[in-house]
Structure formats: C-alpha cells, structure tokens
Image (cartoon, rainbow, N blue to C red):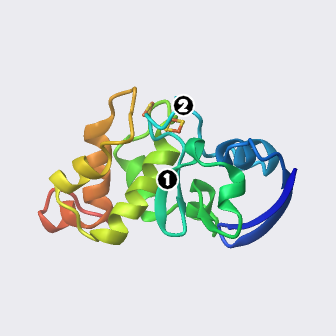
Amino acid sequence: MKRVQFTINGDLYEREIHEHRTLLHVLREEIGLTGTKEGCGAGECGACTIIMNGVPINACLVLAVEADGTEIETVEGESKSGRLSPVQEAFDRHHAVQCGFCTPGMLMTIKDLLQRYPKPSREQIIEGIEGNFCRCTGYEQIIEAVLDATGQLEEKGEIKHA
Ligand code: FES
Ligand code: FES
C-alpha cells in the first residue's frame, strides 16, 4: 500500500492504495467518480480519457501511484458549477449522446482539442477524436456539436441560438 494524493477537478484527495491499481479503478471505485468509463481496459477505445497535468491520457494505462501529486480533470469537473459546459449543451442539442458510454472520454478529448484549437476545423475535430471510439457511430453528431459549441455553425448561418 502507498499513500498518494492528487487534485481532481480542483479538490484534493488523499488515499492509501495498492500499487497495482490503475488510476481508472481508483477514480471509479475508491473515489467514486464513475463518470470516467472502462471500455477495453487496454488503451484502445478512449472511454477512460481524463486530463492529467494538462495532457489527455488513458486512465486505464496509468497506475494510480504514478498520478501522485498530479492535477487531474475528469468529466465531473465539466459541470461542477451545476451547469453543463457549452460542449455538453451542444451535445444535447445535436443528439450526440446515444448510449453515452463514450461521452465522458469524448468530452475530455474535446476539451483538450479546444485548448489547442479554439475553433477547430472539421478535419481537426475528426483527427482530434480519432482515439475515441463511439460504438453507436454518432461521430457526425459529435462533430456538429463541436462546430456548434465553438460558434462555427452560427457564423455560417446554419443555426441560430436565441
Ligand atoms: S478503457 Fe482505457 S482506452 Fe479503453
Ligand atoms: S454514444 Fe454509444 S458509444 Fe458513443
């Protein structure tokens, strides 16, 4: 067992954990933040994407002890204020959530993408989310939601918000 501490969505957590536990399992089972999903458990699907020290990672591939002292952002932080983020609202408008399993990881990948490209092109969005699998094949709605959340559909007159 090892004592670790990390900041998640601005809150400090300290836990005694087994060295072999992944960050994904500690987040979900010991801290209770179940928004982050486990798909493949092998770094292939992106369902477990979180942001650690500003970099998107697959939480299933990182041991929790490796996250000691880091700053972590998970999907729960996106609506911490009690309001959905602009991207979450756009997901809702465009029906970009079907079963929802890929959504938390997708949102964190998009968060990182928008930090690098505040108004990403369609091609940049496609490239940005290529590591996140949506088994419901809702990619088109997700792309439209990102274009909408960044104001690009309204600029083109394709949509008008009140
Ligand atoms: S669960 Fe981590 S990449 Fe699939
Ligand atoms: S909405 Fe079902 S996997 Fe993407």
Q: Going from the N terminus, do you reach mark 1 or mark 2 first? A: 2
User: Along the horizontal axis of the image, is 105 left or right of 133?
Assistant: right
Q: Which residue is mark 2?
A: 39
Q: Residues within 10 Å of mark 1 (few under 14, many from 20)?
A: some
Q: Residues within 10 Å of mark 2 (few under 14, many from 20)?
A: some
Which label belongs to residue 57? 1
| Front in this rendered view, residue 103 or 20 | 20
Name the kind of residue labelled 1 in the image. Ile
Q: Which residue is rendered at x = 67% and y = 73% of the image?
A: 10
Q: Which residue is rendered at x = 59% and y = 35% of the image?
A: 38
CA gap between label 1 and label 2 equals 14 Å
Name the kind of residue labelled 2 in the image. Gly
| Front in this rendered view, residue 28 or 91 | 28
Query: In the structure shown, which secondary structural element does the residue marked by tag 1 occupy?
Result: strand
The quadrant the C terminus occupies is bottom left
User: Along the horizontal axis of the image, is 22 left or right of 134?
Assistant: right
User: Along the horizontal axis of the image, is 66 left or right of 16?
Assistant: left
